[in-house]
Image: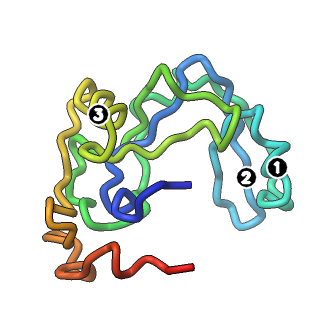
């Protein structure tokens, strides 16, 4: 879950708890998901026929790279889209893997800076998307959110 929609295209890293055990769950289509071992039961419905094929320590995941959810900063192959450690990660809620969007949260900013990941500018002060997300340019995020 994310609190603001503009953090999703701004995700530049994933954070794990170095001392947490993580399950590698292989799905029938070959895709492997990584989530805290303590969270596997909680996500049994979503994982369906997935099978835990290994368990690793969060520290063993540090430095590994991944394909970003959104392509907007995909050219940042040197500093972004890698797994970093953070001391505030747990598995009490969620998966134990946290997306990090520097510039959109104190913890995100601090942990990313400590790991040499700079801010990816998506939403300026006026709340309208700017380059590089071409599909979002000029759209106000607040007007694209559903109302209840």
What's the distance in space between the residues labelled 3 and 2, CA to CA? 29 Å
State the CA–CA distance, disc 1 to disc 3: 32 Å
CB-based contact (under 8 Å), mark 1 and mark 2: yes
> Is 128 left or right of 59, judged from the image as shown?
left
Q: Is residue 62 above or below residue 9?
A: above
Point out residue 123 in the picture as x, y percentages from the top left corner. Answer: 21, 63
> In front: 62, or 126?
126
Q: Is residue 49 left or right of residue 87?
A: right
Asked which quadrant contains residue 74, the reply is bottom left
Q: Which residue is mark 1?
A: 51
Residue at figure coordinates x 47%, y 55% from the top left: 3
Q: Residues within 10 Å of mark 2 (few under 14, many from 20)?
A: some
Q: Name the residue at the front extreme.
A: 148
Q: Secondary structure at mark 3?
A: helix
Q: Identify which residue is drawn at 69% across, 41% down.
A: 24
Question: What label sits on residue 26 in the rendered view?
Answer: 2
Upstream in sequence: badge 1 or badge 2: 2
Mark 1–mark 2 Cα distance, whole angstroms, equals 5 Å
- Disc marking residue 135: none
Circle 1 residues within 10 Å: few <14, some 14–19, many ≥20: some
Percent of width and height locating residue 49: 86, 60
Report the front residue among 110 and 78: 110
Q: Residue at x 41, y 59 (%)?
A: 4
Earlier residue among tags 1 and 3: 1
Q: How many marks?
A: 3
- Does residue 85 lie above or below 108 as drawn? above
For label 3, the crowd category at 10 Å Cα-Cα, with few meaning under 14, some 14 to 19 and many 20 or more, is: many
Residue ID for mark 3 = 112
Image quadrant in which you'd find residue 46: bottom right
Q: Residue at x 36, y 31 (%)?
A: 107
Q: Write down the quadrant of residue 137 in the picture.
A: bottom left
């Amino acid at each position: 879950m994310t609190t603001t929609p503009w953090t999703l295209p701004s995700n530049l890293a994933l954070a794990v708890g170095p001392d947490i055990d993580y399950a590698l769950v292989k799905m029938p289509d070959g895709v492997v998901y990584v989530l805290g071992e303590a969270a596997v039961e909680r996500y049994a419905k979503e994982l369906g026929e997935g099978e835990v094929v290994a368990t690793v320590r969060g520290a063993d995941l540090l430095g590994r790279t991944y394909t970003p959810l959104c392509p907007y900063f995909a050219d940042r192959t040197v500093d972004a889209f890698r797994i970093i450690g953070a001391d505030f990660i747990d598995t009490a809620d969620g998966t134990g893997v946290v997306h990090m969007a520097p510039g959109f949260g104190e913890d995100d900013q601090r942990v990313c800076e400590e790991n040499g990941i700079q801010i990816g500018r998506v939403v300026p002060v006026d709340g309208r998307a700017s380059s590089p997300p071409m599909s979002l340019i000029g759209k106000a995020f607040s007007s694209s959110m559903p109302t209840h």
